[in-house]
Amino acid sequence: MNEELAHRKILVIDDDLSLLQLTRRILERAGYQVFCAVNGADGMLLHEQQNPDLILLDLEMPVMDGITTLRNLRAQDNHTLVIILTGHGTLDSIRDAADLNVSEYLIKPFQSTDLVSIIDKALGS
């Protein structure tokens, strides 16, 4: 395992539990330390506790949706890299996310190799 990657923290915020578990396995296999939240409110708490290097953020979630989560995150932290994951991408959501300093926008379903490649590139790994 790459020692540098083991110290890179990724926070995955998605309400789809099966996708959350799959994404965790993919990223842990790639050598990342992974934290998961099922909604934006929990994600904000984990962000404060874990200070991740990158956040994978779903847009459509209960409690606090992705754009609201991203707005709240950016009010506190404009440096953490964010990659949007969604199955419901619209021009408005892409525009909103772009205005909030997002690194990438990945449409579900995605290939695990694409996900890891995009994260590696965003983190400069």
Image (spheres, helix red, strand yellow):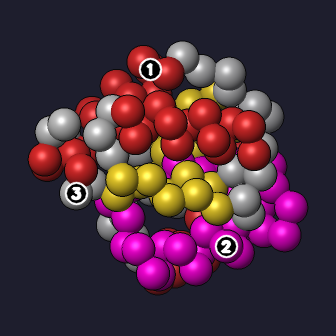
Q: Position of residue 105 (x, y in %)?
A: 54, 36
Gap between marks 2 and 1 measured at Cα:
26 Å
Q: Where is residue 36 in the image (x, y as percent from the top left)?
A: 58, 58
Residue 111 falls in image quadrant: top right
| Residue 118 sits above or below residue 6 on the image | above
| Residue 82 sits above or below residue 89 on the image | below
Q: Of marks 3 and 1, which one's residue comes earlier in the chain?
A: 3
- Helix or strand or loop: what does disc 1 sit on? helix
Q: How crowded is mark 3: few (under 14 residues within 10 Å), some or many (20 or more)?
A: few
Q: Residue 31 carries which label?
A: none
Visible residue check, residue 80: yes
Q: Of marks 2 and 1, which one's residue comes earlier in the chain?
A: 2
The residue identified by callout 1 is: 114
| Residue 86 sits above or below residue 109 on the image | below
Q: Which of label 3 and label 2 is nearer to you?
A: 3
Q: Where is residue 79 in the image (x, y as percent from the top left)?
A: 33, 67
The residue identified by callout 3 is: 7
- Helix or strand or loop: what does disc 3 sit on? loop
The residue identified by callout 2 is: 42
Q: Please name the residue shown 70% across and 75% down the image.
A: 41
Q: Which of 7 and 97 is in front in this view?
A: 7
Mark 2: amino acid: Asp
